[in-house]
Amino acid sequence: MNKQIDEEIVQACLRNEAKAQKALYDFFSRTMFAVCLRYCNTHEDAMDVLQEGFIKVFTRLNQFSGKGSLEGWMKRVFINTALEHYRVNKVYQEQSDVEMANDNPVDGFVLEKISQKEIFELLNQLAPGYRTVLNLYAIEGYNHAEIAEMLGISEGTSKSQLSRARSLFAQAYAKRNNIKQGGR
Amino acid sequence: MADKEHIDSFLKENLGNWEVDAPPDAWLAISKGISASAPAASTAAGTAVTNSVLLPFAKITAALLGIGITSFALVTYFSDSTPIEKENNQPLKTEEVLIPETESRSESKSTAEPTEPARTYVKKSSSSTKTGLVSLNSTNPEPDLGKSAKPENGGAAGIHDEIQTKKPEPILNTSKNQVEKEPEDTKEEEGSENQSGGQFDEPKPIIHTAFSPDGDGVNDELVLEMPPLSFFRIRIFSLKGQLVFETDKPNQFWKGQIGQSGIPAETGNYRFILDYQVKGFEKVRSQTGLIFLAR
């Protein structure tokens, strides 16, 4: 699933060759911008994080150990940049849990053709705390211990935020389907 | 929640490989950013070109840089801790300067002992040249003055080791440290910002908790007076729990209709949940309460 970039481009980037840097950017910018969008509240923030992240990637490329894929490493850089951007530690601890949404209609969760953008928009409707935990756990595949460390929250908080986030996402999804079908 | 795995895999399959065109002008800003942070990058290049002929030169310059930078860092570090260092940088020759100082420091322990190391210290420094390293040698015994002369050597050796390990790629090392320390760094930042934030009271939103959306032009919208924000969202629910209004735009007020439908909401109480972050402040705050809608 991960994209493979030519090793020679990476080597040239390490030598600070501008052409290679542009090539690496062109190769990964679409994927990374999507990551930025998923972790940011606004489009503007995502653009900031994209720039900041790529600058970090190029200045720290020599620290990439070669373990795992370059794409995975870069994603981590971008995610951390985005988290830093919001200094999430605080945000997530103090996020209220006063959501009024009721826990019911998860059963109506049906797979159906829906565009990636629409899914992203549903995900992005969630409060930043929920969105981030769901992103990290479901999409990036971090475990609760890792998430707790990244966000400066307890594992328990991570777990409860995740289940809340799932249920909210499912509700948003069900609601969207209802509207689409003209129901209600 | 039987299908939680379902949701996770649904999200992963759909968004895991999601791609979006980056804004067209992003590269320009990035390439500018890279050249702005060139110093760190140039040493990276220096180490990467290991098979080039320039290697010896690169090594020498890197080593010199290393000594320069680490010693500078250490000198500045020590100079913060004691007044002696500041003087040491210039008047290395005179013993007279030092002795009063050691006396002044001797409040903690006896006067006789500290003078001993102080003298050796002067000899050492005057016998060697005035590079950054020398002042390191001499400064190091300093912290041990009060205790005994013994740890002096050990301490000095310790610093030497540090210098040697740091020599080859000084800048790389520091940048690595930055990476490792990142989480702490952010915490510190928070701490400091909190302090500065404490000096000013965070502005609070003013919520007008009753309104009459009857179209008479008076008090027709639910008005919120918000300070400048970096994040905003309000949701309004009926008491049965139905979401009737939601927005992330602070200047978009609820007009008393249910969703986008245009159906007027009934007279009664509604619950709002307001999440916001005031610009320049850390906390995302959440506030909830009742609104009275009268027709």
Image (cartoon, coloured by chain):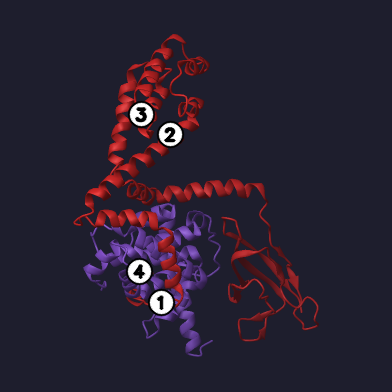
Q: Are marks 1 and 4 in contact (CB under 8 Å)?
A: no
Is B238 drawn above or below residue B227 in the view shown?
below
Q: Which of the 4 image quarters holds residue A142?
A: bottom left
Q: Check disc 4 and give the amino acid type.
A: Ile
Disc 1 and disc 4 on one polypeptide chain: yes
Helix, strand or loop status at disc 3: loop
Q: Check disc 3 and give the amino acid type.
A: Thr
Q: Which residue is mark 2?
A: B75
Disc 2 and disc 3 on one polypeptide chain: yes
Q: Check disc 2 and give the amino acid type.
A: Val
**Spatial separation of the CA atoms under disc 2 and disc 3:** 16 Å
Which chain did the image draw in purple?
A: A
Disc 4 and disc 3 on one polypeptide chain: no
Which circle marks residue B129 in the picture?
Answer: 3
Q: Which residue is mark 1?
A: A107
Q: Which residue is mark 4?
A: A139
Query: How crowded is the residue under tag 1: few (<14 C-alpha within 10 Å), some, or many (20+)?
Result: few
**Spatial separation of the CA atoms under disc 1 and disc 4:** 21 Å
Is A156 drawn above or below residue B166 in the view shown?
below
**Spatial separation of the CA atoms under disc 2 and disc 4:** 48 Å
**Where is residue A41 shown, x and y percent of the image?**
51, 68
Looking at the rendered image, the disc whose residue lies closer to the viewer, 1 or 3, is: 3
- Which is nearer the N-term, disc 2 or disc 3? 2
Q: Is residue B96 left or right of residue B263?
A: left
The front one of B191 and B264 is B191
Helix, strand or loop status at disc 4: helix
Which circle marks residue A118 in the picture?
Answer: none
Image hue for chain B: red
